[in-house]
Amino acid sequence: MGEIERDERIVCVTTGHLLKDPERVIEICEPPTEVEADVEVLRKMVRDRFEAMKCM
């Protein structure tokens, strides 16, 4: 396996209940979040989102 370069983009395809239809996903989900190609930035974003969900 290689490494993802800073100027590359990746795509995460989510599958599961109702999520195999990309048009439906676009209708019901928030727009995707772009994150810098930095693992610490990604960790912080995930941590912050998780903490925000706890308050709901």
Image (cartoon, rainbow, N blue to C red):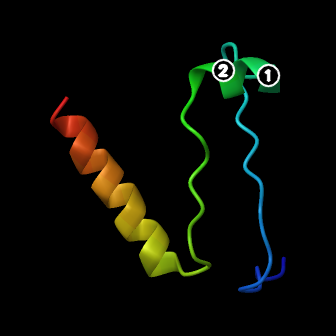
Q: Residues within 10 Å of mark 1 (few under 14, many from 20)?
A: few
Residue at image location 77% in from the left, 54% down from the top: 11
Left or right placement of residue 46 versus residue 25 in this view? left
Is 48 located above or below residue 13 in the figure? below
> x%, y% of residue 28?
59, 20
Q: In which image quadrant can residue 9 be found?
A: bottom right
- Locate residue 2: give its quadrant: bottom right
Question: Disc 2 marks which residue?
Answer: 27
Q: Please, is residue 6 above or below residue 26 in the view?
A: below
Badge count:
2
Question: Can you tell which mark lies on residue 39?
Answer: none
- Which residue shows up at 44% across the image and 75% down it? 41
Q: CA distance from mark 2 to mark 1?
A: 6 Å
Q: Residue at x 56, y 68 (%)?
A: 35
Quick one: label 2, few (<14), some, or many (20+) residues within 10 Å? few
> Residue 23 got which mark?
1
Secondary element at image label 2: helix
The amino acid on which the numbered mark 2 sits, given as a three-letter code, is: Glu
Give SS at disc 1: helix
Which residue type does callout 1 highlight? Glu
Q: Quadrant of residue 55?
A: top left
Which residue occupies the extreme top position in the image? 18
In the rendered image, the residue lying farthest to the left is 55
Residue contact at pointers 2 and 1, CB within 8 angstroms: yes
Q: Is residue 8 above or below residue 54?
A: below
The C terminus: image quadrant:
top left
Q: Is residue 32 left or right of residue 45?
A: right
Where residue 33 appears, x then y in whole percent? 56, 54
Nearest the viewer among 4 and 24 is 24
Is 24 placed left or right of 28 in the picture?
right
Figure quadrant of the N terminus:
bottom right
Q: Position of residue 38 (x, y in %)?
A: 55, 81
